[in-house]
């Protein structure tokens, strides 16, 4: 009887500690105190049930006076969700099978006794708790927290095992009748649950990997845009410096003219015009950052021999931040120039229009291209691995501001049209 009581207490401690480990409860004094109080309360309640109803009824009602209380404690004290609390508790219950199974090995030894069985049980409990806390608790907790679908798939085995164990060994003796379908039920559930979990987990992992890749690519693109704008701002700084030095240039020109050195004056003017053209951004609009960006792509158009026609008429109020509109336009023009470089010189063309139309900000970009661009679900498909995030970034910015981005290919012309309400509605 004493051995049974000791084993009973050890099993309770194992269940509480394992549940807390799976739930990710930190090992602090406050948490240890709370778990100790709830364990003592459960033990006293079990004692009341034992006195009033006997051992068999106490074991049969274990889900009520132990597991239910532990689940409620996790929900209200540690703010676990109901689903998570159930999973952690039933998973810990399932893990009780490990020391229980090993302790029964005592019957195969010549020293078989209740004391040996209890000793093996306690040693195995300590070893199992160490392995759970050291290796299994954190991955299990992260898996349960990752998504509801993963948590449900993961819970199939512990929930089924819990019900099966009570129905076939505690509330009835069906497991010991030798019925084939009863004895093979849990292997069936393990097999089915494994397949279901593998499918769901694989899908969740693919989504997570894709999401991380897209986030990384978008962050890199934003970083590139910031660097691009910074380099263009340096050009503008050079322009301001040159403008500041204009007095010296004019003084030198005046000296040439006063001394009738017309040829030297013309040469000096031509040299300065070349210098100014090399770093002076063209003016397309009043928005400084956008103007710098459009000027940058004008240089690229000149390099590849493409016609480039920005037509910018900005409204008084823009629904996008400076960084958002530059990210959007930069991604769109980068894709446009990449595409138009693939067509013969003479047909290379990029046209940009930004204007207000029917209380919408309309950004329209057309460029020449080959007819090998495929659009699926209104999204151009990337021809190379690691590409295609620019168009997703454009769609994302438009969607956040209640607008839309439309992509179209027709007669070797790729068209992008982004419309965003001027009365910004963020979703």
Image (tube, rainbow, N blue to C red):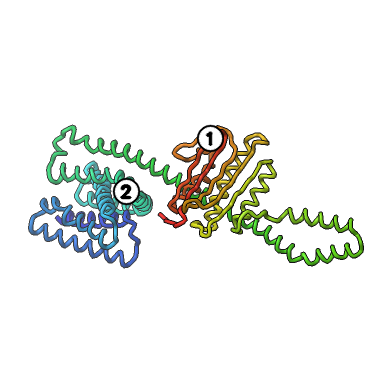
Looking at the image, is mark 1 or mark 2 earlier in the sequence? Answer: 2
Crowdedness of circle 2 by 10 Å Cα count: few (<14), some, many (20+)? few
Q: Which element type, helix, strand or loop, lies under badge 2?
A: helix
Do the residues bearing badges 1 and 2 touch, measured as CB atoms within 8 Å? no
Relative to 30, is 80 above or below?
above
The location of residue 394, given as percent across then percent down, is 50, 48
Relative to 167, is 39 above or below?
below
x 33%, y 41%: residue: 197
Q: In the displayed structure, does residue 177 sit left or right of residue 101?
A: left
Q: Which mark is residue 148?
A: 2
Q: Which mark is residue 410?
A: 1
Q: In the displayed structure, does residue 352 sit left or right of residue 405?
A: right
Screen quadrant of the N terminus? bottom left
Relative to 125, is 347 above or below?
above
x 53%, y 39%: residue: 385
Q: Which residue is more in the foreground, 361 or 327?
A: 361
The location of residue 372, given as percent across then percent down, is 55, 32
Q: Which residue is more in the foreground, 153 or 228?
A: 228
């Amino acid at each position: 009887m004493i051995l049974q009581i000791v084993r009973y207490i050890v099993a309770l401690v194992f269940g509480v500690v394992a549940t807390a480990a799976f739930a990710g409860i930190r090992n602090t004094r406050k948490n240890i105190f709370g778990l100790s109080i709830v364990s003592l309360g459960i033990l006293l309640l079990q004692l009341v049930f034992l006195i009033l109803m006997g051992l068999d009824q106490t074991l049969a009602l274990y889900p009520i006076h132990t597991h239910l209380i532990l689940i409620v404690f996790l929900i209200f004290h540690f703010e676990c969700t109901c689903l998570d609390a159930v999973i952690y508790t039933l998973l810990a219950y399932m893990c009780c099978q490990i020391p229980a199974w090993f302790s029964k090995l005592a019957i195969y030894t010549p020293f078989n006794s209740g004391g040996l069985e209890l000793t093996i049980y306690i040693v195995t409990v300590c070893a199992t708790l160490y392995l759970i806390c050291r290796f299994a608790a954190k991955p299990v907790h992260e898996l349960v927290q990752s998504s509801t679908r993963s948590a449900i798939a993961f819970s199939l085995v512990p929930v089924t095992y819990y019900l099966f164990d009570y129905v076939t060994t505690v509330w009835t003796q069906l497991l010991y009748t030798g019925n084939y379908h009863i004895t093979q039920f849990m292997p069936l559930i393990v097999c089915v649950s494994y397949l279901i979990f593998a499918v769901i987990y694989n899908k969740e992992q693919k989504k997570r990997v894709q999401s991380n890749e897209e986030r990384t690519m978008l962050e890199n693109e934003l970083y590139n845009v910031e660097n691009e704008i910074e380099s263009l701002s340096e050009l503008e700084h050079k322009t301001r410096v040159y403008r500041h030095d204009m007095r010296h240039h004019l003084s030198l020109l005046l000296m040439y003219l006063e001394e009738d050195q017309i040829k030297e004056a013309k040469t000096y003017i031509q040299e300065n015009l070349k210098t100014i053209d090399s770093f002076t951004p063209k003016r397309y609009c009043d928005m400084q950052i956008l103007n710098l960006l459009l000027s940058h792509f004008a240089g690229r158009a000149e390099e590849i021999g493409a016609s480039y026609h920005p037509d910018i008429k900005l409204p008084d109020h823009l629904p996008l931040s400076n960084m958002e509109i530059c990210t959007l336009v930069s991604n769109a023009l980068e894709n446009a120039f990449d595409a138009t470089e693939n067509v013969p010189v003479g047909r290379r063309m990029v046209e940009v229009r930004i204007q207000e139309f029917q209380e919408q900000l309309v950004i329209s970009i057309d460029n020449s291209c080959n007819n090998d661009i495929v659009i699926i679900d209104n999204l151009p498909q990337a021809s190379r691995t690691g590409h295609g995030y620019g168009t997703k970034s454009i769609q994302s910015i438009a969607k956040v501001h209640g607008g839309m981005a439309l992509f179209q290919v027709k007669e070797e012309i790729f068209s992008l049209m982004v419309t965003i309400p001027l009365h910004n509605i963020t979703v």
